[in-house]
Image: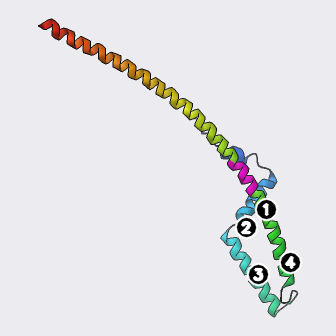
C-alpha cells in the first residue's frame, strides 16, 4: 500500500505566483532584514566619509544621497504594498481553505457521533438481554 502524499496548499499556491509576485516577495524579504539595514548603514557612512574627505562628487549636505534615499523610500513603499496585498490575498485564500476543512471535519465528526449513538443503543440493548438471561436461570434454579 503506497502512502498518499499529503495535500500541500502552500506549494500549490507558490507554483501559481507570477514573476512579479515572486520578485516582490524576494525584495520584501531582503529589504526587511537586518543584513540589508546593516549594509545600508555602512553604505551611507561610506558615502558620507568619501564625500567629506576625498572625491566630493556630492558635498555636504549630500543632496544626491538624499535624492537616492527618497527614491529608495518610494520604491520600498510600493514594493511593500505589493507584497502586503499579495499576503492579504494569500491569507484570505488560506482562511477559505481552513473553513472548508473545518466544515468537512464537522460533517465527519457528526457522522462519527451518530455511529457512536447507535453503538450505545445496541450496547444498552445487549446489556438488557444479558441481564434478562442472567435473571432467568437464577429464577429457574429455585
Whether 88 is among the magenta residues is yes
**Residue identified by numbered label 2:** 31
Question: For the view shown, which residue lies furthest in the bottom direction?
Answer: 53
Q: Residues within 10 Å of mark 1 (few under 14, many from 20)?
A: some
Q: Circle 1 is placed at which residue position? A: 79
Label 4, residues with CA under 10 Å away: few <14, some 14-19, many ≥20 = few
Is residue 16 placed above or below 29 in the rendered structure?
above
Q: Position of 102 compared to 64: left or right?
A: left
Q: Residue 47: where, in percent of width, then height?
A: 79, 84
Is residue 131 found left or right of 70 in the rendered image?
A: left
Mark 4 vs mark 3, foreground winner is 4
Q: Is residue 51 visible?
A: yes
Foreground residue, 114 or 8? 114
Kindly identify the residue that appears in the image at 74 percent across and 76 percent down. Answer: 40
Q: Residue at x 63, y 37 (%)?
A: 100
Q: Give the x, y percent position of residue 9.
A: 66, 43
Q: CA distance from mark 3 to mark 2?
A: 15 Å
Q: Earlier in the sequence, mark 1 or mark 2?
A: 2
Range of magenta residues: 84-91
Determine whether, in the image, residue 81 is placed left or right of residue 120: right
Q: Which mark is residue 44?
A: 3
Task: Please tell me whether mark 1 or mark 2 is closer to you in this view.
Answer: 1
Q: CA distance from mark 2 to mark 4?
A: 18 Å
Secondary structure under tag 1 reads helix
Amino acid at each position: 500500500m503506497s502512502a498518499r502524499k499529503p495535500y500541500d496548499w502552500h506549494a500549490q499556491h507558490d507554483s501559481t505566483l507570477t514573476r512579479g509576485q515572486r520578485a516582490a516577495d524576494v525584495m520584501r524579504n531582503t529589504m526587511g532584514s537586518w543584513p540589508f539595514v546593516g549594509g545600508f548603514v555602512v553604505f551611507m557612512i561610506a558615502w558620507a566619509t568619501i564625500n567629506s574627505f576625498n572625491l566630493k562628487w556630492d558635498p555636504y549636505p549630500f543632496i544626491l544621497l538624499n535624492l537616492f534615499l527618497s527614491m529608495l523610500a518610494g520604491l520600498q513603499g510600493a514594493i511593500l504594498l505589493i507584497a502586503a496585498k499579495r499576503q492579504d490575498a494569500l491569507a484570505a485564500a488560506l482562511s477559505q481553505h481552513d473553513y472548508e476543512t473545518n466544515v468537512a471535519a464537522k460533517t465527519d465528526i457528526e457522522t462519527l457521533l451518530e455511529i457512536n449513538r447507535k453503538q450505545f443503543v445496541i450496547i444498552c440493548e445487549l446489556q438488557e438481554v444479558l441481564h434478562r438471561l442472567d435473571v432467568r436461570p437464577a429464577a429457574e434454579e429455585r
